[in-house]
Image (cartoon, grey):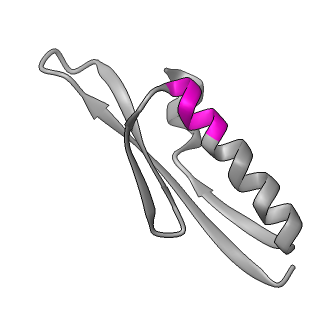
C-alpha cells in the first residue's frame, strides 16, 4: 500500500429526526445529500480507484448505511 484514501459518511436528518440523505466525503471531495444507493455507488467507485492506485481506504461512517 502506498497511501491512504479517506472516506467519511455522515447522516442528514429531517425535522422529525429521520435520516433523509447522506453526505459522502472522499479525499476532501464532498457529495452532499445523496441517497443510500448513490452513497454505495460512490463507495464502490472509491474502492476501484483505491485498488488501481494501490491505496488503503480509511472509511468512517459505513455503519450509517447499514442501519438505514
In the figure, 49 relative to 16: above or below?
Answer: below
Which quarter of the image is occupied by the N terminus?
A: bottom right
**Could you say which is closer to the camera, residue 60 or residue 23?**
23
**Residue that appears at 86% across and 62% down:** 51
In the figure, 22 relative to 24: above or below?
Answer: above
In the rendered view, does 52 fall on the left or right side of 60? right
**Residue that appears at 87% across and 66% down:** 52
Q: Which residues are magenta?
A: 36-41
Residue 50 percent coordinates (x, y): 78, 64
In the rendered view, does 5 fall on the left or right side of 68? right
For the stretch drawn in magenta, the main secondary structure is: helix
In the rendered view, does 3 fall on the left or right side of 52? left
**Could you say which is closer to the camera, residue 59 or residue 39?**
39
**Residue that appears at 76% across and 53% down:** 47
Q: Residue 37 magenta-drawn?
A: yes
Q: Residue 35 magenta-drawn?
A: no
In the figure, 7 relative to 61: above or below?
Answer: below
Residue 38 percent coordinates (x, y): 55, 31
Q: Quadrant of residue 55?
A: bottom right
Amino acid at each position: 500500500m502506498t497511501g491512504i484514501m479517506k472516506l467519511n459518511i455522515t447522516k442528514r436528518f429531517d425535522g422529525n429526526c429521520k435520516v433523509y440523505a447522506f453526505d459522502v466525503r472522499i479525499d476532501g471531495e464532498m457529495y452532499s445529500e445523496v441517497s443510500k444507493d448513490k452513497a454505495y455507488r460512490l463507495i464502490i467507485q472509491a474502492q476501484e480507484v483505491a485498488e488501481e492506485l494501490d491505496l488503503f481506504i480509511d472509511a468512517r461512517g459505513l455503519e450509517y448505511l447499514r442501519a438505514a
